[in-house]
Amino acid sequence: MSAARSAFQKAEMIRTTIVFHTKRKAAMKNEMLDALKTALEAELTGHAFYKNAAANTKDPMGKKTFARMAEEEMGHFNYLRHQYQAVLETGNYDFSKKLGKGDPAHAGNPIFSEELKARIKDSHFEVSALTIGMKLEMEAVKYYTTCADAARSPEAKQLYSRLADWERDHFVAFKRQLEMLKEEYFQANNFIPM
């Protein structure tokens, strides 16, 4: 084999390796961006839902709770938007910006005031909001858990795990409140649970 041919083969191997790694890096970047797009969409949906729930509930405590949750979802959205921009520009997350701390204590607090029970028969909106909120939050938990499992870096795994935990706290709060109201709501409206 001639020296020229050997040099050509080495150069071709190097080029193939560079092309492979470039394509792999681009594919990873696209995966990260796709995951973040889905997360952004979910957080914006949650924000709009909670903002609407705050505006439409008749319960003062429910208004405060839903408004706080709308703010939390917007905080998640802004953080994820920052991460999206970082991945777009650098191909990687920016963990120098921290995700705000969630307050798991809220999960143990009632969403609605005790006065809601007095008018439970007419609380269709509030019960529906709890049910829909539970579904939104559980979908978010599943999605963020899947992202955490697929994450390639410990920081990304931690980010998505933390978001899953926050959304799980929301789910637990909704579930607890719904369980407290469900029996009375069913009885007041002559519903027979299946």
Image (cartoon, rainbow, N blue to C red):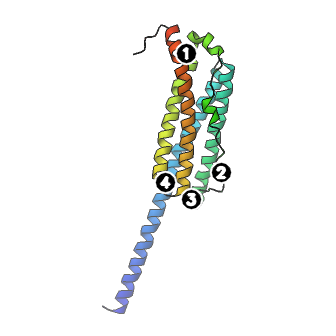
Packing grade of label 2 (10 A; few <14, some 14-19, many >=20) is few
User: Could you give the CA–CA distance between mark 2 and mark 1, rounded to whole angstroms?
Assistant: 39 Å
Callout 1 amino acid: His
Which residue, given by chain and number where applicable, does mark 1 sit on? 124
* Residue that protrudes farthest toward the left in the picture: 1
User: Could you give the CA–CA distance between mark 3 and mark 1, rounded to whole angstroms?
Assistant: 45 Å
Q: Nearer the viewer, residue 5 or 91?
A: 91
In the image, residue 139 sits, relative to residue 121, either above or below, namely below
Pick whichever of labels 3 and 1 is earlier in the sequence. Answer: 3
Callout 4 amino acid: Ala
Pick whichever of labels 3 and 2 is earlier in the sequence. Answer: 3
Packing grade of label 4 (10 A; few <14, some 14-19, many >=20) is some
Which residue, given by chain and number where applicable, does mark 2 sit on? 98
CB of mark 2 within 8 Å of CB of mark 4?
no
Image coordinates of residue 63 in percent, x first then y, are 67, 24
Q: Quadrant of residue 50?
A: top right
Q: Helix or strand or loop: what does disc 4 sit on?
A: loop
Left/right of residue 66 with respect to residue 160 in the rendered view: right
Which residue, given by chain and number where applicable, does mark 3 sit on? 92
Q: Helix or strand or loop: what does disc 3 sit on?
A: loop
Which residue, given by chain and number where applicable, does mark 4 sit on? 151
Q: Quadrant of residue 165?
A: top right
